[in-house]
Image (cartoon, helix red, strand yellow):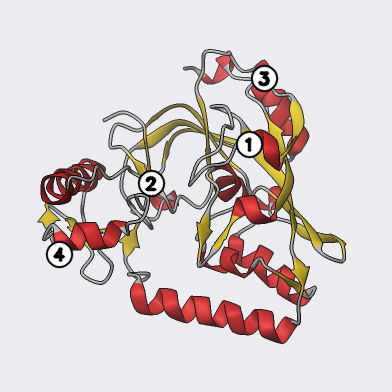
Amino acid sequence: MMADALPKVAGKLTADAPLAPLVWFKSGGTADWLFEPSDLADLQSFLRDLDPSTPVMALGLGSNMIVRDGGVPGVVVRLGKAFARVSQTDELSLDCGGGASGILVSSTARDAGIAGLEFLRSIPGTVGGFVRMNGGAYGGEVKDILVDCDVVLRSGDLVTLPVADLEYTYRHSSLPEGAIVVAARFRGRPGKSDDIQAEMDRISASREASQPLRTKTGGSTFKNPPGEKAWELVDRAGCRGMTLGGAQVSEKHTNFLINTGSATSAEIEELGEQVRQKVKANSGVELEWEIQRVGRK
């Protein structure tokens, strides 16, 4: 698609933009176009005027995603600094931009004496991403704290959706394709900053001890099946440390895949599929991917 076929923007529009540096796995191809809007109006007008047949995908911190080696068609939208704000709206509520990180949201909640948002400290993503997929960890889920969210639809229209409209289930919402979460309101409960910090420290220490955080990884690979833990099923199937090319099942936490250096996205995804087959053969359970896999193979 030629640049002159695209709407004019105030932000930054990059053709054939490498996505590997923007995702945790550090692998994969390019985006046909990468759009970093300057503000909400820029995003709305761009989507409104963009050919409706052009696919649109939002990219946050790229933590829970395999970008395939053939790249991503259409436009990838990345919300930058203009969308990374967090402010307190009342005693127990925060208004957060879609580009704000889980660490920023949980730290702001701590400073305001708002408890119940500590688990966001452990979600390596942005508000837009974890609102879309009902992110959760350490006993908390977004559905427990979300009041409502502002979403720019593929048409460019801005709508506010209450939590009930997202029809949340485990790691899933009913947000339509191409819709981009630009803001969300979270509500917690009264707490003491010191207690909140202690809980955040506990979560951080637990993650550090159990997860391969200092590697190129994609976070939890498979959803936990009802009544089971994905990592235990993977371990029981004998997949701990299993490799394919530069991809490996983490020895530290078997529900994490890692790029040991030069893995292609195809190797990472194929290793995941081999793990699924082994688990199915071993326990009869069909693991579902939690990691998003996007783009052309």
Dot 2 falls on a residue whose secondary structure is loop
Of labels 3 and 1, earlier in sequence is: 3
Q: Amino acid under label 4?
A: Gly
Splitting the image into 4 quarters, where does residue 236 fall? bottom left
Dot 1 falls on a residue whose secondary structure is helix
As measured in the structure, the alpha-carbon distance from the residue carrying label 2 to the one carrying label 1 is 18 Å
Name the residue that disc number 2 marks: 290
Of labels 3 and 2, earlier in sequence is: 3
Name the residue that disc number 1 marks: 166
Q: Is residue 150 above or below residue 55?
A: below
Q: Which mark is residue 241?
A: 4
Q: Amino acid under label 1?
A: Leu
Of labels 4 and 2, earlier in sequence is: 4
Splitting the image into 4 quarters, where does residue 288 fall? top left
| Image spot of residue 71 (x, y percent) | 35, 33
As measured in the structure, the alpha-carbon distance from the residue carrying label 4 to the one carrying label 2 is 20 Å
Of labels 2 and 1, earlier in sequence is: 1
Callout 1 crowding tier (Cα within 10 Å): few <14, some 14–19, many ≥20: many
Question: Which quadrant holds the C terminus?
Answer: top left
| Image spot of residue 291 (x, y percent) | 37, 46
Name the residue that disc number 3 marks: 155
